Image (cartoon, rainbow, N blue to C red):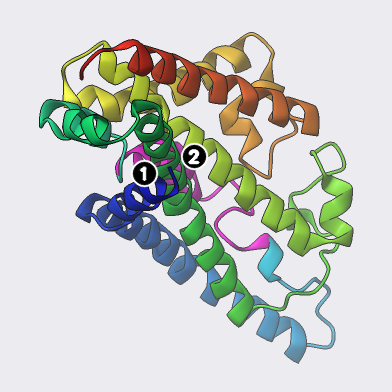
Amino acid sequence: MQRMIKFELKRSFKNRLFLISLLISLALVTWYSIERIPYCVQLNSEFLNDENLMGFFEISYTNWIGSHNIYLQQNIFYMAIPILATLPFGSSFYDDINRGYARNVCVRAKKKYYLVAKYIAVFVSGGCVVAIPMVLSFLISSMFLPTMLPEASYTFTNIYPAYKWADLFYVQPLLYTSIYIFITFLFSGVTASLSLFITFFLDRKFVTFVFPFFIYIFSSFCLEMLGFDAYSIRNLVTTTSESGTTFSVTILFLIFFCLSFFPYYFIGAKKDVF
């Protein structure tokens, strides 16, 4: 079991699609950093050099790619999460079945081991390809901007008391930032894993990429239209949303985990051959 998990993880990270997806994510981070960070550095310099200027420092906690959802690069990044997460290894199950690889593996090892290992690999690679650029974005911001505590009275802090975990942001901003990156990792991974069970129903590889994106966007849109904003993935992974609680984050993740894992696992386990 452990050997199979390690092997599938190795396959998921050592392939060109993972590299392509990571490069796209990093390109968005670079684009955002080039456009935003020099401007913030200039504002801080003006603030330091002008004794009569009233204002606040621009800090790293409010200027990494996950700190807001108001700039073009940030909107593109959050909209593209399901595509970026699925691209690295989401279609690998389809390829394994159609190329006979899955059959050969299941002859030599227990099918349930292969199914679990595949799910873990898709989940982890999908989460990492989104979380790694987010961590890098925060590190870039921290290199050029101070990492001091946020000022609650600063308009562009954009984290208001109504937002989830707002109190934590003003006391432990690093923990707050880490939690949001981890949440994005979890939802990116579980969204990418939706590509697995759909493989049993359709014979088009392209669908394995589109289906997670469709669920991500459609579910968020429907829940927001019905007034259940607290259970919209799009709202839960962004810091500048008034919706969501620890309870709603936990419940939505468990729902998506159940939808992505159990149908895939039980259908796969019942099939005599792939």
Could you tell me if the residues under marks 1 and 2 are in contact, i.e. CB atoms within 8 Å?
Answer: yes
Q: Is residue 153 visible?
A: no
Residue at the (82%, 44%) spot, across then down: 165
What range is drawn magenta here?
62-87
Percent position of residue 196, x then y: 35, 26
Residue with the mark numbered 2: 188
Question: For this view, does 30 lie left or right of residue 274?
Answer: right
Question: For this view, does 156 lie left or right of residue 258?
Answer: right
Residue 92 sits inside the magenta stretch = no
Secondary structure category for the residue under label 1: helix
Question: For this view, does 207 lie left or right of residue 246?
Answer: left
Residue positioned most to the front: 108
Q: Is residue 181 above or below residue 193?
A: below
Residue with the mark numbered 1: 84
Question: For this view, does 244 lie left or right of residue 218?
Answer: right
Q: Is residue 221 above or below residue 157?
A: above
Amino acid residing under circle 2 = Ser
Q: Is residue 261 above or below residue 8?
A: above
Percent position of residue 207, x then y: 24, 22
Mark 1 surroundings within 10 Å by alpha-carbon count, few (fewer than 14), some (14 through 19), many (20 or more): many
What is the magenta segment's predominant secondary structure?
Answer: helix
Quadrant of the rendered image containing residue 220: top right
